[in-house]
Image (spheres, rainbow, N blue to C red):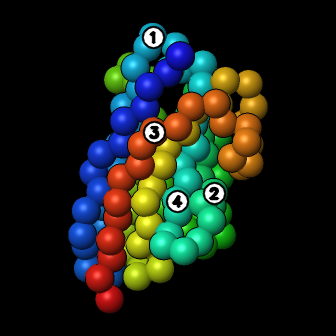
Amino acid sequence: QVQLVESGGGLVQAGGSLRLSCAASGRTFSSYAMGWFRQAPGKEREFVGRISRSGAITSYADSVKGRFTISRDNAKSTVYLQMNSLKFEDTAVYYCAADRVNFGELQKMYDYWGQGTQVTVSP
C-alpha cells in the first residue's frame, strides 16, 4: 500500500511557474513508476507525464512538452512536477499516481492515487 500526498498548488499568473510535489509513504517508492495527471473543470482527467522507477526516463503529453519537467528523489520518496510558462488552459486539479508493474500513460494502469492539488492560472 502506498499513500500519495500532493502539495504546491496555488494561484499563478500566466507565464509563471509552480512546482508540485508528491510525497509517498512506505519504503518501496523506488519500485513504482510515477505519473502526473490533471483534470480541468468539465473535462476528463488526462495524462500529463510519467517518470520511470530510476528517474532515467520521462515522457510528456504534447500539451506540456517543453514546459513541464518531472523528476524524482527516491531517497525522499518524492516526485516533482516543475511547471514553467504556465497557461490559462493548465488550470486543473493535478494528481500524482503510482504504478507497481507498468510504465504507461493509461490511468487504469496506475494502482495508487493522491487526492489532488489545485492549480489555477490567471490569464
Q: Are marks 2 and 3 in contact (CB under 8 Å)?
A: no
Q: Type of residue at label 2?
A: Phe
Q: Percent from the top left, x then y, of residue 82?
A: 39, 55
Q: Residue furthest bottom?
A: 123
Q: Percent from the top left, x then y, of residue 25?
A: 40, 20
Residue linked to disc 1: 27
Q: Are marks 3 and 4 in contact (CB under 8 Å)?
A: no
Q: Of the two numbered discs 2 and 1 on the same chain, state the one appearing first in sequence.
A: 1
Foreground pick, 69 / 25: 25
Q: Are marks 1 and 4 in contact (CB under 8 Å)?
A: no
Q: Type of residue at label 1?
A: Arg
Name the quadrant containing residue 102: top right
Residue linked to disc 2: 47
Q: Residues within 10 Å of mark 3 (few under 14, many from 20)?
A: many
Q: Residue furthest top?
A: 27
The residues bearing labels 4 and 2 have C-alpha atoms spaced at a distance of 7 Å
Residue at (53% x, 16% y) in the render: 1
Q: Is residue 41 above or below residue 5?
A: below
Q: Say whether residue 67 is left or right of residue 56.
A: left
Q: Are marks 1 and 3 in contact (CB under 8 Å)?
A: no
Residue linked to disc 4: 38
Question: In the rendered image, which quarter contains the C terminus?
Answer: bottom left
Q: Percent from the top left, x then y, of residue 12?
A: 25, 73
Q: Say whether residue 9 is left or right of residue 79.
A: left
Q: Type of residue at label 3?
A: Gly
Residue at (30% x, 67% y) in the render: 17
Q: Residues within 10 Å of mark 4 (few under 14, many from 20)?
A: many
Residue linked to disc 3: 114
